[in-house]
Amino acid sequence: MTRFTPVIALHGGAGTILPSKITAEKEAALHAALRACLQAGLTLLRQGAPALDAVTASVMALEDDPLFNAGRGAVFTSDGTHEMDAAVMEGTTRACGAIAGICGPRHPVLAARAVMEQSGHVLLAGEGAARFCASVGLEMMPPDWFGTPARREALEAELERRRLNLPDDGDPARKHGTVGAVACDVHGHLAAATSTGGMTAKRPGRVGDSPVIGAGTWADDETLAMSATGHGEFFIRWAAGHEIDARMRWAGQDLARAAGDVVAELGARGGSGGLVAVDRHGNVALPFNSPGMYRAWCDKSGEIRTAIFRADVHGSDTLLE
């Protein structure tokens, strides 16, 4: 049986801190966090674990880190509550699961995986989804566990901006926060996982692209696995994941062209964001049209790289202990 070189990539959202606002200490902390979260999945891949286990592990690590907008550190809705979305998909059979608009599971990505493996459904939302999560034994946390002072301050600042009817400052850190991971395992199977707290001060009940299969999350062994981040309404309208798949499957485009063109086309229409993707050959693509995108990856070279903006790639072939 052919064994493939394991490949993994992740994003911590296209809602990066603007270069003018980031400190050296904050930048170093972000690179370290991205690398540690990538390591969580890469270690499993190198042990021969399935791609689905690897992307789940990396996203769980991202959800536990309050630097990112998922799980602990999720942003607040305009009502001062948390509504989290997540999805998982594996490429062998297109099995998938998703949750939307929930608060409770410590790891929303595990809730999405439970929907896939234990519910017989693809997408559960709201109170019914929360009850399902509790019924299958997922670790549940109180609402105040997810919030942080920084997220509360961001909510208050946005609500004040709206109250005073001031212009939008375009800060991507407030608008686009999502985490996700994609992987190709030693058997050549693909998987994707995505998790998000949404957009700061979003309208309660709003659901973005993260839990929408074919938009923000997608995996098929014949083409690619992808996880998106950005202005979710645009990724939904363009069915971004499925659009990239179609261009590869029917137009014969390679991953870099198909993914890059879709992200560029969304950007030209006002859809800020990006994605991480891997194809069945282990090629990686990380296109984005926003000022930056928190990202980390280990391609077929075996080198771990992290980046925030376009020209700040940090690389190392030494794994964390």
Image (tube, helix red, strand yellow):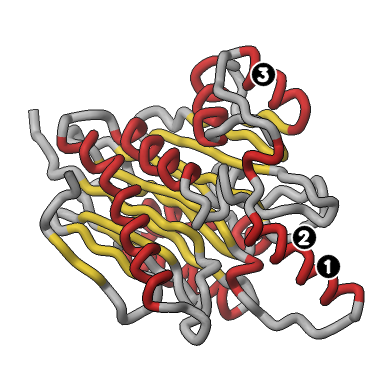
Q: Please name which of the two marks, 2 or 3, marks the residue nearer to the observer.
A: 2
Q: Earlier in the sequence, mark 2 or mark 1?
A: 1
**Amino acid type indicated by mark 3:** Phe
Q: The residue under label 1 is which amino acid type?
A: Leu
Q: Decide: marks 2, 1 in contact (CB < 8 A)? A: yes
Instruction: Name the residue: 42% across, 64% down.
Output: 294
The residue shown at (10%, 35%) is 3
Q: Which of pointers 3 and 1 lies earlier in the amino acid sequence?
A: 3
Instruction: Give the numbered dot on residue 159.
Output: 1
- Please tell me which residue is depicted at 61% across the width and 71% down the height of the picture: 271
Residue that label 3 marks: 132
Considering only order in the chain, which callout, 3 or 2, is on the residue closer to the N terminus? 3
In the rendered image, the quadrant that contains the C terminus is top left
Given residues 244 and 236, the one toward you in this image is 236
In front: label 3 or label 1: 1
| Residue 226 located left or right of residue 162 | left
The answer for how far apart the CA atoms under marks 2 and 3 are is: 27 Å
- Cα–Cα gap, marks 3 and 1: 33 Å
Asked if 297 appears above or below 205 in the picture, the reply is below
Can you identify the residue that label 2 sits on?
201
Q: The N terminus is located in which quarter?
A: top left
Residue visible at 62% across and 50% down in the picture: 74
Would residue 128 be found to the left or right of residue 13 on screen? right
Residue 33, given in percent of the width and then of the height, sits at 36, 55
The amino acid type found where label 2 is placed reads Ala
250 in relation to 121, above or below: below
Asked if the residues shown at circle 2 and circle 3 are in contact, with their CB atoms under 8 angstroms apart, the answer is: no
Q: Position of residue 132 (x, y in %)?
A: 66, 18
Would residue 301 be seen by someone viewing this image from the given angle? no
Location of residue 67 with respect to 312 vertically, above or below: above
Crowding at label 3, few (<14), some or many (≥20) Cα neighbours within 10 Å? some
